[in-house]
Image: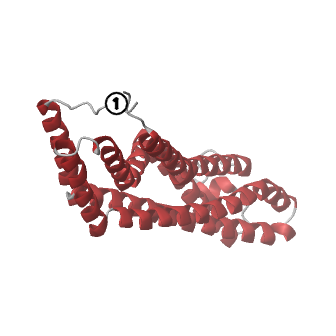
Amino acid sequence: MVSEPVNPSTRLKLALTFAVLLAIAINWIPEFDRAAQDYLSDTISSNVVVFGVVRTLNGVISVVQSAEVGVGVAGVGLGEIFDPVNDLIERFSGLLLVTLTALGIQQVILLLTTSTIMKIVLSVMALMPLYALWKKPNWRSLVLRLFLVMLLLRYLLSIQVGLIWLFDQLYFDATGEQALSVLEASAQVLQNLRDTLTEIDLRRLIFGSDTPALDSEDMGTRLSTSVVTLIVGMLFKSILIPVGTVWLGYKAAGALILLRRQP
């Protein structure tokens, strides 16, 4: 037996009406969408900078390794040390291309979900739950669920960008900047080494004669650590957080659609 819909009180109706109107108002506030778009654009730009540094470092290491074959025992040892680092950097550059592509796709989707057409559609759809709430109680449950699904789709990518911002604030801003500075400094050192292949004393190339030496093993370790740090950050920002957000959105939308009102 189908139960009659339970009529909410006037106070609850007014509260739901206010919530829907608030959603419509936020939908048309440009600052929220602009903040998400700007942050995603900044993320893409910073990844492009990292990609440039990584490709430069990869090229310099390759030149140093190939040029040092005839230098002697020291040159062979340096090449052996930087060979695994160079392989890691090459794989990282490939990952960066994937992440840049993923971020570009996200940017396109964000532009679509924040477009004027989407805002108009959401505003029009918001009138349906208001009408059902006050005039058509039999429609109320279905229409409200459909509106919530539409609202979720509208803000899902903005929520994802917010999670990326939170990840940057809590972890990646400091560690990522430090790792990138290590890569930039190492690229400069190796460029100096490439230009003066007969000078294998890295202490003099980097710090001068009055400071402790930074040997090639230490540089290789620091490079590897920095690259792994950046890889972890890129994976979280461009793959794990987006996929996790989409999965949670899918589960939430499915729960709303399949939700049945209890008799």
Taking the image as drawn, is residue 115 in sight?
no
Q: Which residue is mark 1?
A: 3
Give whichever of 1, 153 is nearer the camera: 1
- The spot of residue 75 in percent (x, y) is 81, 62
- The spot of residue 16 in percent (x, y) is 20, 39
Give whichever of 44, 261 is nearer the camera: 261
Q: Secondary structure at mark 1?
A: loop
Picture quarter with the N terminus: top left
Above/below status of 3 relative to 243: above
Q: What residue sits 69% from the left and 46% below the top?
A: 221
Residue extending farthest to the top is: 263
Count of number-bearing discs: 1
Give whichever of 167, 228 is nearer the camera: 167
Give whichever of 15, 262 is nearer the camera: 262
Residue 121 appears in which quarter of the rendering?
bottom left
Taking the image as drawn, is residue 255 in sight?
yes
Give left or right: position of 75 versus 132. Answer: right
Picture quarter with the C terminus: top left
Above/below status of 84 relative to 170: below
Amino acid type of the residue that numbered disc 1 sits on in the rendered structure: Ser
- The spot of residue 137 in percent (x, y) is 24, 41
Q: What residue sits 48% from the left and 66% below the top?
A: 104
- The spot of residue 117 in percent (x, y) is 29, 69
